[in-house]
Amino acid sequence: MSALVVVASFGLFADGRELMQQSIWAKPLKFGVSFVIYGATLAWLLPKLRRARRTMWILGTAFAVTGLVDVGFIAVQAARGTYSHFNINTDAFNQIGQVVFSSGVIGLFGASLLIAVMLLFQRVGDTALTWALRAGIGLSVFGMALASFIRGWAATGPRKVEDAYGNPVSLMGQHGVGAPDGYGMPITNWSTVGGDLRVPHFIGLHSVQVFVLAVLVLTALAARISWLRGERVRAQLTGVVILGYTAMFAITAWQAMRGQSLVHPDAATWTAFAMAVVVTALLAALAISTARRREVAPAGDGHSPGTLPTRGPVGSLGRDGTAAR
């Protein structure tokens, strides 16, 4: 995938062919970057697991192989100047490739789902990291599932488009909801005129990196902030990040399914987003205030709830000047 990123980046500048007003190498580049990030995460995670290590190795290898085949097909179709997704042209190469492509998507989803399930039965690092990985892989599975849902939800029947050479191509399905593909944002190519299920797909797919990054940031801050040094506090704040991010995934999926562009939210979307922000902020404030109170309590005068008066040897004086028994 790293090699593909290099090749596709070069292709953006050296190859002028386009599909829907976008370089033919834009899609291979985005998939390459995405799989570099996700693959590196799995490569870091799987060796840390202590149970069923051989099974995890097999799942990781299955993910790598199916990812290579799937993204390889995307790159080959780009080199041919035609579409990889939704292409129902009847030439032999495309017909065989589409079967392999569809099978690969199932393989990627299945391997990730099994890894997510097996993570539920073992611990990786402290509580915050364990839950970050469980929730992250789990939400990534939902993001992958949404990719397979795109074809059925957004499909509007066969339509004709042109490949990079002006030849007709038949497509069945699209990423957009309520508007055909095209008219996209720079880089992501997410629709600016209708709903686009690639938005929640992306958010879900890379949730594990966001959650692990949150844990790393909290751990780094704990070196300077004393009330963050408790494992329970960091786990609670990680849970708040997970909750807020999951709400964003749900809201963007709901928005896309209503045929609404990410950049043109209506009042309902703004209200849902505002509620998610407020609830997340309140939960974070509650976790922080509770942690700070716990830190201050032991520094009281010895009469705080849960503390015992200081006692010295027989005949000595306690803190209040009375003789200790």
Image (cartoon, rainbow, N blue to C red):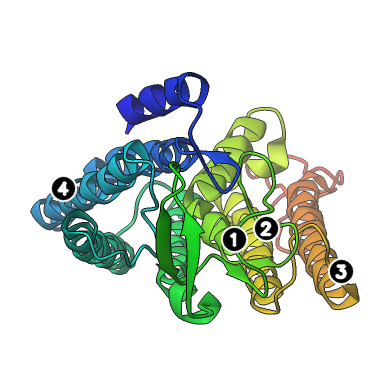
Q: Earlier in the sequence, mark 2 or mark 4?
A: 4
Separation (CA) of disc 2 from disc 4: 34 Å
**Nearer to us in this view, 181 or 59:** 181
Residue at image location 16% in from the left, 47% down from the top: 61
Residue that carries the numbered disc 3 in the rendered image: 270
Q: Determine the secondary structure under disc 3.
A: helix
Q: Earlier in the sequence, mark 1 or mark 3?
A: 1
The dot on residue 191 is: 2
Q: Amino acid at mark 3?
A: Trp
* Location of residue 22 (image quadrant): top right
Q: Is 100 situated left or right of 4 in this image?
A: left
Separation (CA) of disc 3 from disc 4: 42 Å
Separation (CA) of disc 4 from disc 1: 33 Å
Q: Amino acid at mark 4?
A: Thr
The dot on residue 61 is: 4
Q: Position of residue 160 (x, y in %)?
A: 48, 66
Marks 1 & 2, CB-CB < 8 Å contact: yes
Separation (CA) of disc 2 from disc 3: 18 Å
Q: Is 153 situated left or right of 298 in this image?
A: left
Residue 96 visible in the current orientation:
yes
Q: Position of residue 185 (x, y in %)?
A: 69, 47
Q: Earlier in the sequence, mark 2 or mark 3?
A: 2
The dot on residue 181 is: 1
